[in-house]
């Protein structure tokens, strides 16, 4: 696996007389995390299917590493070695009796030997953190386990780019953390991940780039910039991430020297930077100014002194 770019240029797709994508553009640089957002029916899944080769646009092109995808049998086979799509519902992809056989299906169909396929399956199960489930019947898996098993089947193909449609939907907080930990392990193996989600807080905290689908087109950019755009967020039927919403209500400006406003840590840094210059010694009723200054001075010293 290696980092290759994935691009969509002028992509148009329609179901019957309903246009879903109209001149859609997307760039996924190798090694970047991209979050794809939008309302239900906006075209997120359609765009993912076009990127994977499952759907053929009526106009435009999809390219990997600068090479346009060809929609003949050989071209699609080559493309799917590089780009894999995992659908939102794992039951749409799991069909074998147990996890091991399901994950091995793809590698065996590549014509690999049994030993080569087994090595890929073991690797994929380890990366997704489900090696202990290898012989578990798929119908006995929890929802989160089924999601990771479906992703393992795609990972066993060793794609350069992995497209995930709502991988955290329906998971409890612990399940979301397990999923994100698995994605970090994939990134260490040079797999670039594109993740479609409705979770704006996850997109803000996780992604390097956000892409919002609305009106058949794609707005792409820094997550903090796009998701702070109230008009864009409203048109996409999303909500502003709580960190950005709270920062806006408090009048906090983004400080280029502080942590990005993406999560609780970034918000705490921004608040600290805002409050630090305005902290002044105060005096309680009946208290001398010298006592108040001495008390505040010792507190400030204790707060800023590095641990020995």
Image (tube, helix red, strand yellow):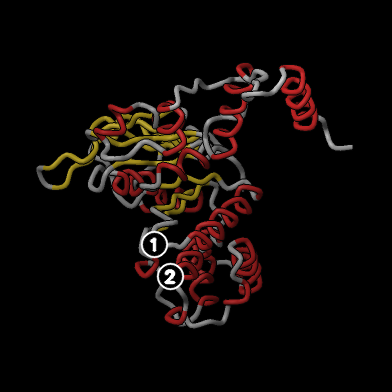
Are the residues flagged by discs 2 and 1 in contact, CB closer than 8 Å? yes
Viewer-proximal residue among 199 and 46: 199
Disc 1 crowd, CA 10 A, few/some/many (<14, 14-19, 20+): some
Earlier sequence position, callout 2 versus callout 1: 2
| Residue at horizontal 50 percent and vertical 57 percent from the top | 176
Residue 149, position as x, y percentages in the image: 50, 68
Viewer-proximal residue among 261 and 199: 261
| Residue at horizontal 45 percent and vertical 48 percent from the top | 79
Q: Which mark is residue 170?
A: 1
Residue 232, position as x, y percentages in the image: 30, 29
| Residue at horizontal 49 percent and vertical 50 percent from the top | 162
Q: Which quadrant, please, contains the C terminus?
A: top right
| Residue labelled with disc 2 | 143
Instruction: From the viewer's perspective, tell me whether residue 95 is left or right of residue 281.
Output: left
> Is residue 219 positioned above or below 170 on the image?
above
Instruction: From the viewer's perspective, tell me whether residue 157 is left or right of residue 16.
Output: right
Give the secondary structure at mark 2: helix
Check the image and name the residue furthest to the front: 286
Q: Is residue 59 visible?
A: no
Give the secondary structure at mark 1: loop
Q: Is residue 285 visible?
A: yes
Check the image and name the residue furthest to the right: 308
Instruction: From the viewer's perspective, tell me whether residue 261 is left or right of residue 71.
Output: right
């Amino acid at each position: 696996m290696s980092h290759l770019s994935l691009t969509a240029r002028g992509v148009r797709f329609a179901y019957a007389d309903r246009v879903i994508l109209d001149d859609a553009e997307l760039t996924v640089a190798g090694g970047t995390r991209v979050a794809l957002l939008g309302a239900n029916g906006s075209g997120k899944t359609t765009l993912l299917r076009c990127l994977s080769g499952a759907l053929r646009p009526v106009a435009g092109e999809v390219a990997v590493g600068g090479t346009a995808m060809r929609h003949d049998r050989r071209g699609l086979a080559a493309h799917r070695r590089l780009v894999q799509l995992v659908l939102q519902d794992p039951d749409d992809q799991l069909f074998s009796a147990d996890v091991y056989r399901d994950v091995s299906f793809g590698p065996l169909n590549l014509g690999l030997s049994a030993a080569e396929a087994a090595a890929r399956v073991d690797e994929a199960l380890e990366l997704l953190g489900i090696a202990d489930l290898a012989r578990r019947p798929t119908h006995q898996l929890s929802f989160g386990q089924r999601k990771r098993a479906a992703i393992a089947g795609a990972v066993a193909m060793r794609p350069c780019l992995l497209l995930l449609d709502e991988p955290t939907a329906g998971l409890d907080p612990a399940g979301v953390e397990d999923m994100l930990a698995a994605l970090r392990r994939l990134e260490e193996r040079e797999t670039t991940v594109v993740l479609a989600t409705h979770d704006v807080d996850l997109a803000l905290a996780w992604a390097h780039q956000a892409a919002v689908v609305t009106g058949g087109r794609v707005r792409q950019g820094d997550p903090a910039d796009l998701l702070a755009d109230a008009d864009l967020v409203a048109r996409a039927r999303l909500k502003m991430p709580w960190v950005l919403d709270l920062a806006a209500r408090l009048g906090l400006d983004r400080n280029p020297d502080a942590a990005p406003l993406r999560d609780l840590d970034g918000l705490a840094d921004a608040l600290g930077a805002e409050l630090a210059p305005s902290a002044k010694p105060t005096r309680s009723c009946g208290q001398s100014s010298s006592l108040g200054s001495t008390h505040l001075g010792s507190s400030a010293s204790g707060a800023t002194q590095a641990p020995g």
